[in-house]
Image (tube, rainbow, N blue to C red):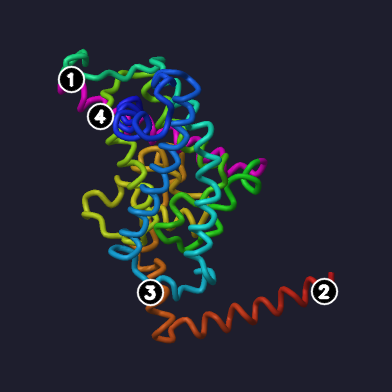
Amino acid sequence: MDLVLNYVDYNFFTPYVYPTTWPEDEPFRQIISLLIVTNLGALVLYLLFGTLSYYLVFDHSLKQHPQFLENQVQLEIKYALQSLPWISIPTVALFFAEVRGYSRLYDNIEDSPYGWFGVILSMLSFLFFTDMCIYWIHRFLHHKLVYKRLHKPHHRWKVATPFASHAFHPVDGFLQSIPYHIYPFLFPLHKVTYLGLYVAVNVWTISIHDGDYRVPDFLKHIINGSAHHTDHHLYFDYNYGQYFTLWDKIGGSYKSPSSFEGKGPHDYLKKLKSGELASIKNDHADEDVVSRDSLKNK
């Protein structure tokens, strides 16, 4: 993050914002600058890539799904915009530690113990490390002691849009982001690579909420994509992973996506339009009446 901070200091903060007598490396100034940069950066990433995904990728027919809420897009955006500033506070604390030199981030490829191979290896290990950590953090957030307070707001969106990607309770959002931030304190990582990965994981988070289930056949049960994450929102106890299905398979929480089996949200809408679900709906209505009557009698 010091690369970003140095850039905005040189081009904006120092010449136009702060007094010349305030040193760029003064801690309080750095914290203020990091708060501004982090919040603006989060907004740009969320709104830019969320909007692109919503208009270019997201299938708007999903808005006709019975579990799609009224004014859901506006609600998702509102909730995310309320949460992001709160998430930024502990995030900035970690960025500040990076800027002050406490991480293992390095500037030059030559500083890597294994050169370019080390950089590529660190990218792969970053993905596998964060995927593992997020899996267990995500499962913890589904525990009955914390779910209602922290994670339930994100599951309000059963049929999500890309704007649901960052619509978390602030504590939930920060907890699931911790692995991204602690990795460079534990392992060597090139600074530019870290920035690229940070942008990429935010774009990925948006993409798994975009309702586009297309995946090459040989990756369908390896990559935890939008189809897998859609089932997580719909069926709750499955597919906690972030990028891969590995930890879901190890943890016994893997579910083959319903959309791969012709039972996903798009398939539901097709059947609904063709009238195939009419009899099912009537049967369910009759069952509800019986259930209510039995409850009254108890």
Q: Is residue 295 left or right of residue 97?
A: right
Q: Name the residue rendered at 84%, 69% in the picture.
A: 298
Residue where numbered disc 3 is placed? 61
As helix, strand or loop, the secondary structure at mark 2 comes to helix
User: Cα distance, mark 4 to mark 1?
Assistant: 10 Å
Q: Earlier in the sequence, mark 4 or mark 1?
A: 1
Determine the image quadrant of residue 105: top left
User: What percent of the width, then of the height, locates residue 193?
Assistant: 25, 30
User: What percent of the width, then of the height, locates residue 180?
Assistant: 40, 32
- Look at label 3 and name its amino acid: Ser
As helix, strand or loop, the secondary structure at mark 4 comes to helix
Residue where numbered disc 1 is placed? 109
Residue where numbered disc 4 is placed? 192
Within 10 angstroms of label 4, few (less than 14), some, or many (20 or more) residues? some
User: Cα distance, mark 1 to mark 3?
Assistant: 47 Å
Is the Cβ of the residue at disc 1 closer than 8 Å to that at disc 2?
no
Q: Is residue 287 magenta?
A: no
Q: Nearer the viewer, mark 2 or mark 4?
A: 4
Q: Earlier in the sequence, mark 2 or mark 3?
A: 3
Within 10 angstroms of label 3, few (less than 14), some, or many (20 or more) residues? few
Q: Name the residue rendered at 32%, 65% in the picture.
A: 55
Within 10 angstroms of label 1, few (less than 14), some, or many (20 or more) residues? some
